[in-house]
Amino acid sequence: MCVIDSRSRRSSPSLLARRLLPALAILLAGATTLPAAELPPYLADRGTGIPMSQFGTYVEPEQLLVYPFYEYTRTPRFEYHPSELGAVGEKDFLGRLVERESLLYLAYGISPRLAIELEGALHASTTFEKSPDDPSTLPARFSESGLGDVEGQLRWRWREETDRRPELYSFLEVVLPLQRDKMLIGTQDWEGSLGFGALKG
C-alpha cells in the first residue's frame, strides 16, 4: 500500500490490509496523526482517520491511499442454474469456478468527516466448468476476461469517538454496470447499498 499525504513527508507504518497476497506494500510517506503517546487511549491503535472498507484501514484529511493487490479464488462446488449463465434450465447444479483478479484500491480523505474510495478489478479472468450432470446447452467449459467489478464509496463520520461514546459513521456504495454483456465477470446492473457503523477503541 502506498500512502501519500500532501501535508507531511515523514514516513509512518503502513496499514494492515484485508486482502491476501498484496502485489505491492510500499510506504512512501505519511504520519498524519498525533504520536501515539499524545492520542487518547481509545485512539492509540488506529489514530484519528475515518474507517474505510478495507479492514483496519483509516484515512486522514488530504491523505491518499494507493493499494494494488491480486486475488485468486477457487470454488470447487459452485452452485448455479443454467438460466443464470444464458442457457435454459432452473435446476441447481454444482460446477467449478476459478477467478483471478488484479485490483486497485484508492482512498482519499476530503475532510475530517468525509472520505471517498474507489476499488476496481483492472483485469479479471474467470473460468467456469459445468456439472457433468447438467444436460443444458452450456459449454462444458468457458472463460471470460476483461474489466471486472468497479465500485466506489462515500464515507461520512457523524460523530467522533470520545472516552464514553463510540464513533458513528455511514457509507454509500455504488457498483457500476460496466459488463452488461458478460456472465462471469463484472457487474451487469447498477447496484447500491447504504450502511451504518459504530467504532469504539
Image (cartoon, rainbow, N blue to C red):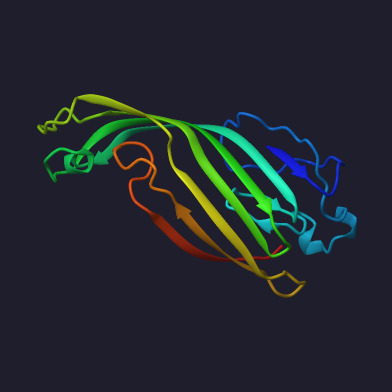
Number of numbered discs on residues = 0
Residue at image location 33% in from the left, 46% down from the top: 188
Q: Position of residue 183 (x, y in %)?
A: 29, 38
Residue shown at the point (80%, 44%) measured from the top left: 30
Looking at the image, residue 141 sits to the left or right of residue 50; the answer is left
Q: Is residue 22 left or right of residue 162?
A: left
Residue 90: x and y in percent read: 14, 46
Q: Is residue 51 above or below residue 31?
A: below
7 shown above or below 79 = below
- Residue drawn at x 56%, y 35% as measured from the top left: 20
> Which image quadrant: the N terminus?
top right
Image coordinates of residue 124 in percent, x first then y, are: 43, 31
In the shown orientation, is residue 85 left or right of residue 66?
left
Q: Residue furthest bottom?
A: 164
Query: Which quadrant of the structure image shows residue 87?
Result: top left
Q: Quadrant of the C terminus?
A: bottom right
Q: Position of residue 193 (x, y in %)?
A: 45, 61
